[in-house]
Each structure stands twice: as C-alpha cells, then as structure tokens.
Image (cartoon, rainbow, N blue to C red):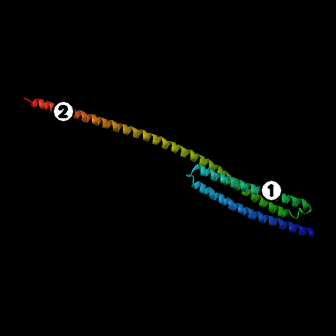
C-alpha cells in the first residue's frame, strides 16, 4: 500500500513536470511564431539596406540559439531528474512503465519541436543566401547606373563642344559674308564710277 502511495506521488510529480513542460513548449511555440513573423517581415523588406537585413538575421539566429540552449538545458535537467527517480525506485519500475511511456511521448514531442527549430534555422540560412544575391544584384545595378552617368557626362561635354564649334562657324560665316558684302559694295562703286 505504501508502495502504491509512493508510486502515485511519483506519478503525480511526473504529471506536474509534464504540465510544466507543456507550458514551456507553448511558450517556445509562441516565440517560434514570433520568429516566423519576423522572417515574413524580413522577406517583405528585401529592398532595405543589406546591413539592416544582416542585423535582423543575426538577431534571429541569436534567438534561435537561445531557444535551442533553453530546450537542451531543460530537457537535460528533466532527463537527469528522471534517471535519479528511476534509481531510487528500482522496485517500482513495473508500476511506473506507463508513466515512462508517457514521458517518452513528450520527449518525442520535444524532438519534433527541435526539428521545427532546425527547419527555421535552414530558412534563415536560405534567407541569408537570398540577401547576399540581392545585394550583388543591387551592386550590379549601381555599377550600370554609374556607367550610364559617365556616358551621359561624355555626351554632354561632346554636345557642348559641338555647340561651341557651331558658334565659331557661324561667327566665321558672318565675317566672310560681311567681307563679301564689302567687296560687292566696292565693286558696285567702281562700276558706277565714270
């Protein structure tokens, strides 16, 4: 009877730990949702400065690492507690097998959550690669714009030079026309003289 009472107390303690683990997992799910929302915002803001995107990615990577560390620490602490309890209750292993199976299911759930975190980490990596390629494209466009600006400056200088040449040609033409008119006037005057 005492053994059953101890087993029940131990099962109750494990159930409490499981409930606490569920609360922690819900918290992690909320934080993962927040990270996914940040990722979505980052996707929408790809036209922003690459340095700003890199800072956001670094912040998200830090958050994922914090989550990973917390999950690992809590899982490790839970496993240590379970092993100590198992050693102290060697005679009650058969009665507590159902509780251990339930804990195994929770550990599988935690492994599933860790797999989701790895997936988010992979998404971050792909996002960083996309940001790098977008930055290269922006630099390529900037180089093209610089070349176009240089060509425009050359054309403007050439047009200005051509305008000066046209003005000089017009001045020369007026001078020649003036000389021709003077000569024509002199010829008329000579022809008109008796």
Image quarter in which the N terminus is found: bottom right
Q: What residue is shown with label 1?
A: 76
Q: Position of residue 102 (x, y in %)?
A: 80, 63
User: Which element type, helix, strand or loop, lies under badge 1?
Assistant: helix
Q: What residue is shown with label 2?
A: 182
Q: Position of residue 136 (x, y in %)?
A: 57, 44
User: Badge 1 local density, few (<14 within 10 Å), some, or many (20+)?
Assistant: few
Front residue of this view, candidates 33 and 160 = 160
Q: Position of residue 166 (x, y in %)?
A: 31, 37
- 78 w.r.t. 12: above or below: above
Q: Tell me how far mark 2 sits from mark 1, CA to CA.
A: 111 Å
Residue at point 44%, 40% (across, down): 151
Residue at point 87%, 59% (across, down): 84
- 75 w.r.t. 130: above or below: below
Front residue of this view, candidates 143 and 102 = 143
Q: Position of residue 135 (x, y in %)?
A: 57, 46
Tell me if 129 is positioned left or right of 18 in this view. Answer: left
């Amino acid at each position: 009877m005492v053994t059953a009472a101890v087993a029940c107390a131990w099962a109750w303690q494990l159930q409490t730990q499981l409930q606490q683990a569920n609360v922690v997992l819900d918290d992690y799910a909320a934080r993962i949702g927040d990270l996914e929302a940040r990722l979505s915002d980052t996707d929408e803001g790809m036209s922003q400065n690459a340095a700003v995107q890199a800072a956001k990615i670094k912040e998200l990577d830090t958050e994922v690492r914090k989550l990973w560390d917390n999950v690992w620490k809590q899982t490790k602490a839970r496993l240590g507690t379970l092993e100590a309890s198992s050693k102290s209750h060697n005679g009650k292993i058969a009665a507590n097998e159902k509780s251990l199976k339930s804990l195994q299911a929770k550990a599988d759930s935690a492994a599933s959550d860790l797999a989701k975190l790895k997936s988010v980490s992979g998404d971050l990596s792909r996002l960083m690669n996309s940001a790098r390629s977008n930055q290269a494209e922006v630099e390529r466009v900037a180089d093209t714009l610089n070349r176009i600006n240089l060509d425009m400056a050359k054309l403007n200088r050439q047009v200005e030079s051509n305008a000066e040449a046209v003005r000089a040609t017009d001045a020369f033409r007026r001078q020649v026309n003036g000389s021709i008119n003077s000569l024509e006037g002199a010829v008329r005057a000579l022809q008109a003289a008796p």
